[in-house]
Image (cartoon, rainbow, N blue to C red):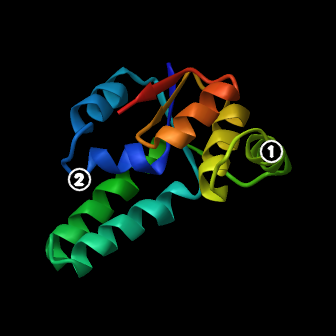
Amino acid sequence: MRVFFDSSAFVKRYVREPGTNAVLDWCDRATEIGLSAIALPEIVSAFCRLRREARIDDGQYRQLKHLLLADIEDAAICDLSPAVLAQTLASLEAAPLRGMDAIHIGSARVLQVDVFVSADQRQIDAARLAGLRVETV
């Protein structure tokens, strides 16, 4: 099963918070994990914020980043192609979304995933409207 994670969901793989167990379960069930190319900088940004807020130290930051980079080696990473941008624009025109959230939806549509996993309610609603099977974490 091809499972796509937006950044709000995939970060839960590394940072324990509500929804972490569901994300880990979806990761275990996936035959392929799909991510947008923007997921990596968004997730590293979250790790940097945790470090700035002193919720993790430098060693924990390095470990989280190392784990993320190792995990995405086998993931299907969707670049910002013309097809992704077309799907992104269609999502923006159909629903009240931020640009980055629409890129995740456009990426998932181009990858033709089986499941779209997110923790962002506005994005979830828009992904359903775009015809994706959505799971909330």
The image quarter containing residue 22 is top left
Tag of residue 93: 1
The image quarter containing residue 137 is top left
Percent from the top left, x then y, of residue 41? 49, 66
**In this picture, residue 104 sits left or right of residue 116:** right
Q: Residue at x 15, y 74 (%)?
A: 59
Q: Residue at x 47, y 39 (%)?
A: 121
Q: Amino acid at mark 2?
A: Val
Q: Are marks 2 and 1 in contact (CB under 8 Å)?
A: no
The answer to whether residue 78 is visible is no
Tag of residue 119: none
Query: Tag 2's secondary structure?
Result: loop
**In this picture, residue 85 sits left or right of residue 64:** right
What residue is disc 2 on?
Answer: 15
Q: Is residue 21 above or below residue 74?
A: above
Could you say which is closer to the camera, residue 85 or residue 129? 129
Percent from the top left, x then y, of residue 32? 49, 29
The answer to whether residue 64 is visible is yes
Q: Amino acid at mark 1?
A: Glu
Q: Residue at x 51, y 55 (%)?
A: 39
Percent from the top left, x then y, of residue 48? 32, 74
Could you say which is closer to the camera, residue 38 or residue 33? 38
Q: Residue at x 26, y 61 (%)?
A: 64
Label 2 neighbour load within 10 Å: few <14, some 14-19, many 20+: few
Percent from the top left, x then y, of residue 30? 42, 24
